[in-house]
Image (cartoon, grey):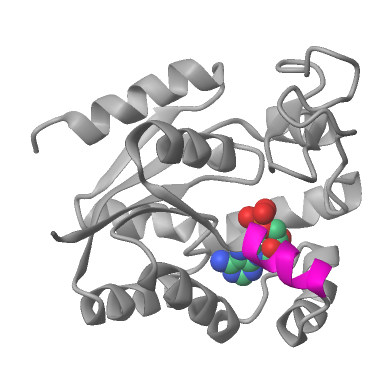
Amino acid sequence: MERVGIVLLGPPGSGKGTQAKKLEKELGYKQISTGDLLREAVREGSPIGKMAEKYMKEGALVPDEVIVKLVEEALLQTQKFTLDGFPRNTNQAKMLEGLLESKGAVLQHVILLVVADDEIVKRLLARRVCPVCGRVYNLITSPPKNDTICDDCGVELVKRQDDNEVTIRNRLKVYREETAPLINYYRSKGILKEVDASRQPEAIFSDIVEIISAKK
Ligand code: AMP
């Protein structure tokens, strides 16, 4: 069986993680989130985690070589995957191409989640995450059933350290300067699809499923 993958592209807070989790649960595309892998490394206090922490606190990009190594390891363990938060710049996109070729994998789609900036800041400030299962909530638009407790795990939700106004602004700046050029990069390759991500997760997911199921 051929190894296949999807890239979810979009600013912080556009819903990449939420959609990647749905793709994993419903269609078997394993979520490879470089942000989650880095946060795990920080929690464990591993050498990578120690090095990455200062970049993450500022909302800056962690060096490409470190990230590509993380992705390579994750890719080896799966046949069907979604890349969530990677690539983040053109250099990473080129490194990804080399990686995919060496693993006999192909990129099926790059799906761009489109949301306006002011909506993003609002979303990130209201974002809470389950520290156990990683499920993402928004206290305004998709709150848990009880207060700030995860519906699935029953534990108190947490706010990500980088979801504060100063770091959010910097993450948006980094997105505009370093990641947004990937839109034209993938558009020119003819594999970019756009989805209106200002809507509820279910509506966004249904568009993504349509893209994936469509015969090219
Ligand atoms: P995310 O969870 O995708 O919002 O990522 C959180 C933080 O992890 C980012 O602000 C970066 O500091 C770092 N990070 C995640 N993915 C990458 C990547 N592909 N390249 C460089 N840094 C990354």
44 above or below 14?
A: below
- Quadrant of picture, ligand 1: bottom right
Residue visible at 38% across and 79% down in the picture: 95
Taking the spot 82% from the left edge, 21% from the top edge, the residue there is 139
Name which residue lies at 52% across and 39% down: 21
In this picture, which residue range is highlighted in magenta?
Answer: 36-44
Residue 164 screen position, x and y as percent: 89, 46
Q: In which quarter of the image is the N terminus?
A: bottom left
65 to the left or right of 193:
right
Residue 102: image quadrant is bottom left
Instruction: Please tell me whether residue 138 is drawn above or below residue 21 in the rendered image.
Output: above
Say if 181 sits above or below 62 in the image. above
Q: Which quarter of the image is occupied by the C terminus?
A: top left
Q: Where is residue 159 in the image (x, y as percent from the top left)?
A: 87, 42
Q: Is the magenta stretch mostly helix, strand or loop?
A: helix
Q: Is residue 67 magenta?
A: no
Q: How many marks?
A: 0
Residue at 83% x, 77% y is 45
